[in-house]
């Protein structure tokens, strides 16, 4: 017998990758607009630029998911307990 979960959990889990990808594209567009030399891998230190881009990628992804979790909490979609560890927590399993 399949157990039914509240629709809010389906929404929050499906929205996480969309928001994460949107945050990364937004950060990439800001980087391209304000720091175009950073994306030019032909000149300068390649190791430094790749390390900086990886760092931006990680912080952009984690940051956008953190902000989305706070937004879901402030809108009342998730409680503080449910939002801990968002999007990796699975409060519907408790």
Image (cartoon, rainbow, N blue to C red):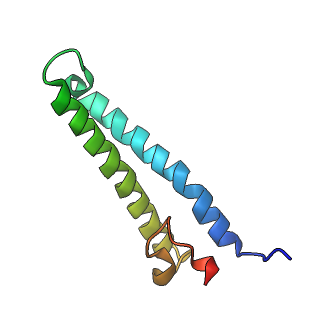
Residue that sits furthest to the top in the current view: 42
- Please report the residue visible at 34 percent of the width from the left and 41 percent of the height from the top: 27
Q: Quadrant of residue 49?
A: top left
Name the quadrant of the C terminus: bottom right
Tag count in the figure?
0
Q: Position of residue 70 (x, y in %)?
A: 42, 69
Residue 70 higher or lower than 20, as above or below: below
Q: Quadrant of residue 80?
A: bottom left
- Please report the residue visible at 36 percent of the width from the left and 33 percent of the height from the top: 29
Q: Quadrant of residue 39?
A: top left
Name the quadrant of the N terminus: bottom right
Q: Position of residue 7 (x, y in %)?
A: 70, 70
Residue that sits furthest to the right in the current view: 1
Residue 57 higher or lower than 1, as above or below: above
Instruction: Out of 19 and 87, give the one closest to the viewer.
Output: 87
Q: Position of residue 42 (x, y in %)?
A: 22, 15
- Please report the residue visible at 34 percent of the width from the left and 43 percent of the height from the top: 57
Residue 91 higher or lower than 68, as above or below: below
Instruction: Out of 9 and 36, give the one closest to the viewer.
Output: 9
Q: Viewed as shown, does residue 14 lie left or right of 84?
A: right
Residue that sits furthest to the left in the current view: 44
- Please report the residue visible at 42 percent of the width from the left and 47 percent of the height from the top: 23
Instruction: Out of 47 and 38, give the one closest to the viewer.
Output: 47
């Amino acid at each position: 017998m399949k157990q039914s979960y509240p629709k809010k959990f389906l929404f929050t889990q499906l929205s996480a990758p969309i928001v994460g990808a949107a945050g990364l594209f937004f950060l990439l567009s800001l980087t391209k607009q304000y720091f175009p030399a950073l994306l030019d891998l032909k000149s300068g230190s390649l190791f430094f630029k790749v390390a900086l881009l990886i760092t931006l990628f990680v912080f952009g992804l984690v940051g956008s998911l953190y902000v989305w979790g706070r937004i879901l909490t402030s809108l009342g979609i998730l409680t503080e307990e449910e939002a801990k560890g968002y999007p990796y927590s699975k409060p519907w399993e408790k």
